[in-house]
Amino acid sequence: MLEIQIEHTSDYTLCRPVGELDAYTVSVFREALGALDEGSCLLIDLTSVPFMDSAGLGALIGGIRRAREAGGDVAVACGRPTLTRLLHTTGFDRVVSVTETVSDAAAALADAQPPPP
């Protein structure tokens, strides 16, 4: 079973899946990403995901694409070495900022934002 926790801050929306992100649970993750505000900054925290397969990776990439097409930006926090290795091996970290902690990912989002006028 996969649970999705959503938190809104003044700077970004935090999406935290809790549980395995695989072919059996990926629809819950896709729906949650699709329901988020368009054009906002999105921080995806994979810290509570012990396993992710190609279906989960595909949903993650799709969510990032939708967020960027809507004018938003995305960062991923992932402190699990096995998932981090997957993200690096697939080149995912060249598409989006991948950091170890939520605070580092929030800082990466802040650095990516244009300065206020």
Image: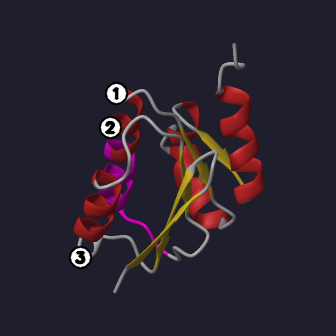
Residue lying furthest bottom: 1
Q: Of the residues under marks 1 and 3, which one precedes in the sequence? A: 3
The residue under label 2 is 66
Secondary structure type for disc 2: helix
Q: Which residues are magenta?
A: 51-62
Q: Amino acid at mark 1?
A: Glu
Relative to 80, say whether 48 is above or below: below
The residue under label 1 is 69
Secondary structure type for disc 1: helix
Magenta-colored segment: predominant secondary structure: helix
Marks 1 and 3: CB-CB under 8 Å?
A: no
Q: Which residue occupies 61% across, 69% down?
A: 47
Marks 1 and 2: CB-CB under 8 Å?
A: yes
Q: Which mark is residue 24?
A: 3
Front-most of 68 and 93?
68
Q: Which residue occupies 36% across, 40% down?
A: 38
Residue lying furthest front: 117
Answer few, some or many: residues within 10 Å of disc 2's Cα (few below 14, many 20 plus, some between 14 and 19). some
Q: Position of residue 116 (x, y in %)?
A: 70, 19
Q: Amino acid at mark 2?
A: Arg
Q: Which residue occupies 70% across, 58% down?
A: 102
**Where, by quadrant of the figure, is residue 107 drawn?**
top right
**Where, by quadrant of the figure, is residue 110 drawn?**
top right
Q: Position of residue 83 (x, y in %)?
A: 56, 62
Circle nearer the viewer, 1 or 3: 1
